[in-house]
Image (cartoon, helix red, strand yellow):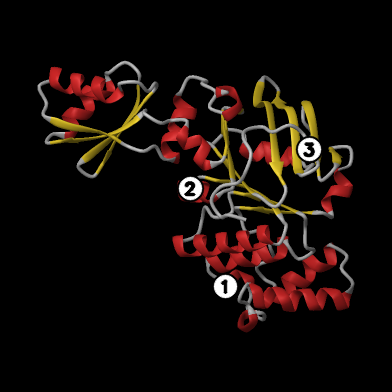
Amino acid sequence: MPRCTGQGAGAAPMSDDAAIRARGLTKRFGALVAVDRVTLTVPRAHVYGFLGPNGSGKSTTIRMLCGLLTPSEGEIEVLGLRIPEQAEALRRRIGYMTQKFSLFEDLSVRENLEFLAAVQELPKAQAARRIDELLVQYRFQDRQKQLAGTMSGGQKQRLALAGAVIHRPELLFLDEPTSAVDPESRRDFWEKLFDLADGGTTILVSTHYMDEAERCHRLAILDRGVLVADGTPGELTRALAGRTAVVHAAQPRNAQQALVAVPGVLSVAQIGNSLRVLSEHGGDATGRLRAALAEAGLQAEVEAEAPNLEDVFVSATRGEGEDTRPEARA
């Protein structure tokens, strides 16, 4: 399986190869609508990313999908089980990991894994073999007696992931698991995720990092509880063709002030001495930018630029509700 993009487009119709299927998923907390009619399909053995601003509904959606929170409306089917009605049967088949280290800091690495094996009711002999296997896979052979509380953030993260998969779950939920670790540890963590996906595990992971989003087979973006984009990274970026440009100006701050006032410009971000501009619509976007700079008396070069996932994110979350899912553009 490729490590960048998957197959298919958008919220695909329900099928037997889907690990998760949700339709019209809604969660209200009093007058607050935290998740608003979300419909999505997660294919089996894929790394499916959730991206969105703080408060966008990612964590709430994940908790409903794994049976920890009852939806106000909508239908959920996970691994062929109806949720929340069959949530208890589902718990033996899934793993769950949050950004906050949730194991026992006053227990050793091996003791934490032994505890989690007991929680999952693994027979002792089977648990011992599985723990030995995980100690090798996650590089804890020489640290199995070390107290978890004395480890680095990256080591704690690896231990938490080892614990989440001790019972070989079919589906793994990861809620912003890499927010508190260094870039090298994040890269190592993602290699472990792809090892799991290659072995048949389906992974749903929420993240704030664009480089992580680019690695997902499929990606969904939530904004204020609404699913505003859903597809492979390639599909989502191709949908913005003709809408991104780079401006090279002698006075970038003055150029930025001129461009933000142009109708249809969604974002002007300075990157070094250049400006990256995202427009609401394509067509002759670069021509409009050149005209605005000339009118302001500024000398600048404007070049079309290939869109990236950051552009997708900005477009989806600032596009005034524009639906960027592939099937909505068909």
Whole-percent x, y for residue 278 in the image: 35, 29
Q: Secondary structure at mark 1?
A: helix
Q: Which residue is mark 3?
A: 15
Q: Is residue 157 left or right of residue 27?
A: left
Q: Is residue 245 left or right of residue 209?
A: left
Q: Is residue 249 above or below residue 126?
A: above
Q: Which mark is residue 209?
A: 2
Q: Earlier in the sequence, mark 1 or mark 2?
A: 1
Residue ID at (77%, 58%): 169
How far apart are the two marked residues, 1 and 2, measured between alpha carbons?
Answer: 27 Å
Residue ID at (84%, 37%): 84
Query: Type of residue at label 1?
Result: Thr
User: Residue 232: which quarter of the image?
Assistant: top right
Q: Earlier in the sequence, mark 1 or mark 3?
A: 3
Q: Which residue is mark 1?
A: 150
Residue ID at (75%, 75%): 131
Circle 2: is it few (<14), some (14-19), or many (20+) Cα within 10 Å?
some
Res. 252 visible in picture: yes
